[in-house]
Amino acid sequence: MTWLPEASAHAMRIDLLLAGLVVISLAVLGLVFGLMLLNILRFRAGRTTAIARAIAAHKSWRFEIVWTAVTLAIFFALFLWATQLYVVGFRPPAGAIQVYVTGKQWMWKVQYPGGQREINALHVPAGRPVQLLLTSEDVIHDFSIPVLRIKHDVLPGRYQSLWFTADRTGSFRFYCTQFCGLAHSRMTGTLTILSAADYAGWLNSTPASGSLAATGEALFIRSGCSGCHASSRYAPDAADTSRAPSMVGLYGSRVVLADGRAVVADAAFLHDSIVDAPRRPGASFATEMPSFRGVLSEDELAALVAYLQTLSPTLPPSAGN
């Protein structure tokens, strides 16, 4: 039992890490102050100089070296544990449900793969991994769900990714924990964790304006992307793939940039390549793609990314039910 409610195994591990850090810190604090008190008593005024000199003559550095080395090893182990928890939080498992969360003064806009939308509310199923793709339309926000022990800065024009697997049903609060303006304190929402059956029922009963992928496909054509990028998974279209890479199979693959770096084309890469294309030129293509920053909204970018994910046959997009 913890002093704060938990709704995931990750939350329990974070609590154990913090408890271990507090216990070790208190132990070191007690040791340091205990040694200080011992030396105050041993070398207090009134003891003869000869006794003090005799005690000092038997001084050894072994004890100091041992306790310093032990505490260093313990804190280093805690550091490795914390690093492992941090890194795992950014590596969602295959098949995670992708939910797009956009921060805007002063609300959270949520989009699901099936086209369902919410404001200041997030519905997820228990027992299934959920990946949150976070971005902002204006200023820096910070998305925090205390019951899951997760939080991350949400930056304008960039995707940040977090994932979790909730293990208990119920309703909990989430917040913006980065001061973002006058109504910052009201930028909160409700996380509702449902059973698998209840989540499927919620998806079916919530109005949807077409799936994100279908919306993104129409936007891909309307924005002129299909003029340079091949997008048909069955046959080449009219795009000139010598000028720009094909979108078929791009998601999840390794891409070599003009500077020689190889990166994985995940959702964040696709998003950033659309809004900051000049910063991510491909190694094999001399044509420079224009930036769509300010041209497409974050909702439209989410739909485009969802569509591009469907073009990777070996990595189907995450289902919403």
Image: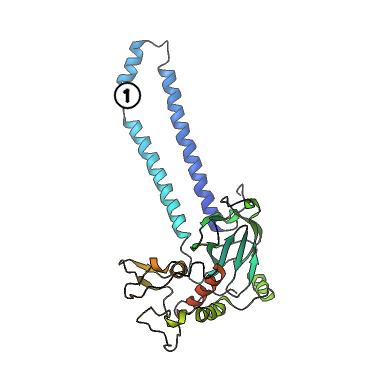
- Name the residue: 38% across, 35% down: 67
Relative height, residue 225 to residue 140 (above, below):
below
Give 184 or 77, whichever is nearer the viewer. 184
Query: Which residue is the site of mark 1?
Result: 59
Mark 1 neighbour class, 10 Å CA radius: few under 14, some 14 to 19, many 20 or more: few
Q: Quadrant of residue 228?
A: bottom left
Q: Position of residue 130 (x, y in %)?
A: 55, 66
Q: Position of residue 313 (x, y in %)?
A: 45, 81
* Secondary structure state at the residue bearing disc 1: loop
- Name the residue: 58% across, 66% down: 127
How was this image coloured?
rainbow
Q: Position of residue 132 (x, y in %)?
A: 54, 64
Give 231 or 85, whichever is nearer the viewer. 231
Q: Position of residue 73 (x, y in %)?
A: 38, 43
Judged left or right of residue 310, residue 243 is: left
Q: Quadrant of the C terminus?
A: bottom right
- Name the residue: 43% across, 20% down: 40
Q: Is residue 194 visible?
A: no
What is the residue that sits farthest to the right in this orientation?
A: 205
What is the residue that sits farthest to the bottom in this orientation?
A: 235
* Number of residue marks: 1
Relative height, residue 189 to residue 225 (above, below):
above
- Name the residue: 50% across, 73% down: 305
Amino acid type, label 1: Lys
Q: Quadrant of residue 53?
A: top left
Q: Is residue 4 visible?
A: yes
